[in-house]
Each structure stands twice: as structure tokens, then as C-alpha cells.
Image: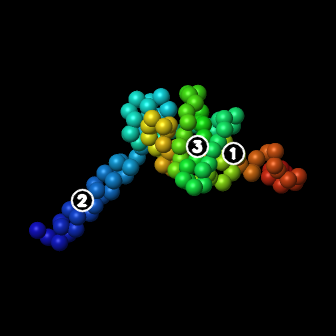
């Protein structure tokens, strides 16, 4: 077998391995109701912070609890075993990667979409739009 054939086979094997690793890490976007149909399975839920419900952070155990509302309108207690993210109350949207359990939705990772500081309400006079 030629060296070029061997190199091509190795390249293909590495590419297939990379695709398999990427696919196994990809989680499915669902609502809380769907996540609770198969507890323990990792899902990604996109929702909003329920700003009227209480939030609790215990610094000793590094446990942050809050209530989120998914895109279908279902409220659910969320447990995040990390410190409370900075400016969490200001977030417009919360993406939670985790799994359903008896104690709530256990978020392993939280991503926040915060309000943009570059919108029409915050424009400085004379800046932000171009007119001729």
C-alpha cells in the first residue's frame, strides 16, 4: 500500500471520529415537559427567568435555585450547582443544558442572552444612524 493511501485512510478515520464526538455532545432542544418524559437524559431548554418567583443561592454548597419558564409557558424549578451568574436578573433569555430529576431541572450549563446596550433607546444623539 502506498504512503498516500495510508495517509488518506488515517485522515478519513480522524474525520469520522470527530463527527461522532460532535454528534454525541449535541443535545436536543426541548421544553420542560419533554425533558421530564425521560429523566436523566441531557437536553437543552430555552426559556426565560420567572422574575416574580424567588431565587436562592447558597454559597456554602454552591447551589443556585430559580424558576424558569420555557417557550411553551411551563414553569419549572431549576437547580444550578455553580455560583449565580453575574447580572442573571437582567437576562432576556436563558439557555439551560442539563437533565430532569425529582428535585427539578438540573442545569449543568447556563447561557444567558442579555439585553443589548446598542439599541435605539440607548443611542447617543448624533451617533448610531447615518443620514446624508
Classed neighbour count for the residue bearing mark 1: other residues with Cα under 10 Å, few (<14), some (14–19), many (≥20): few
Q: Nearer the viewer, mark 3 or mark 2?
A: 3
Residue 130 in view, yes or no: no
* Disc sitting over residue 51 in the figure: none
Residue most toward the left?
1
Provide the secondary structure element on which disc 1 rests.
Answer: helix
User: Mark 2: which secondary structure?
Assistant: helix
Quadrant where the image shows the N terminus: bottom left
Say if 59 sits above or below 49 in the image: below
The residue carrying mark 2 is: 13
Which residue extends farthest front? 60
Q: CA distance from mark 3 to mark 2?
A: 44 Å
Residue in the image at 44% along x and 31% along y: 36
Residue to which mark 3 is pinned: 65
Q: Position of residue 14 (x, y in %)?
A: 28, 61
The mark nearer the N terminus, 3 or 2, is: 2
Q: Is residue 21 above or below residue 105?
A: below
From mark 3 to mark 1, how far is it between C-alphas? 13 Å
Quarter-of-image position of residue 72: top right
- Depth check: give the residue in front, 88 or 66: 66
Residue, x 55% and y 54% (percent of image)?
Answer: 62
- Number of labels in the image equals 3
Asked whether 11 or 49 is in front, the reply is 49
**Crowd tier of the residue under label 2, counting other residues whose Cα lies within 10 Å: few below 14, some 14–19, many 20 or above:** few
Which mark sits nearer the N-terminus, 2 or 1? 2
Residue topped by disc 1: 89
Q: Nearer the viewer, residue 120 or 97?
A: 97
In the depicted structure, whether residue 17 falls above or below residue 47: below
Residue at the extreme bottom of the image, as rendered:
3
Residue 92 occupies quadrant: top right
Q: Is residue 117 left or right of residue 31?
A: right
Amino acid at each position: 500500500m502506498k504512503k498516500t493511501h495510508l495517509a488518506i485512510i488515517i485522515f478519513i478515520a480522524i474525520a469520522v471520529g470527530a463527527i461522532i464526538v460532535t454528534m454525541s455532545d449535541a443535545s436536543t432542544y426541548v421544553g420542560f415537559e419533554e425533558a421530564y418524559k425521560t429523566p436523566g437524559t441531557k437536553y437543552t431548554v430555552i426559556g426565560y427567568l420567572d422574575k416574580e418567583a424567588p431565587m436562592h443561592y447558597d454559597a456554602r454548597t454552591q447551589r443556585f435555585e430559580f424558576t424558569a419558564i420555557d417557550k411553551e409557558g411551563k414553569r419549572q424549578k431549576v437547580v444550578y450547582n455553580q455560583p449565580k451568574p453575574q447580572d442573571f436578573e437582567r437576562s432576556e433569555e436563558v439557555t439551560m443544558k442539563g437533565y430532569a430529576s425529582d428535585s427539578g431541572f438540573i442545569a449543568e450549563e447556563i447561557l444567558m442572552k442579555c439585553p443589548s446596550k446598542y439599541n435605539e433607546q440607548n443611542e447617543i444623539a448624533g451617533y448610531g444612524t447615518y443620514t446624508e
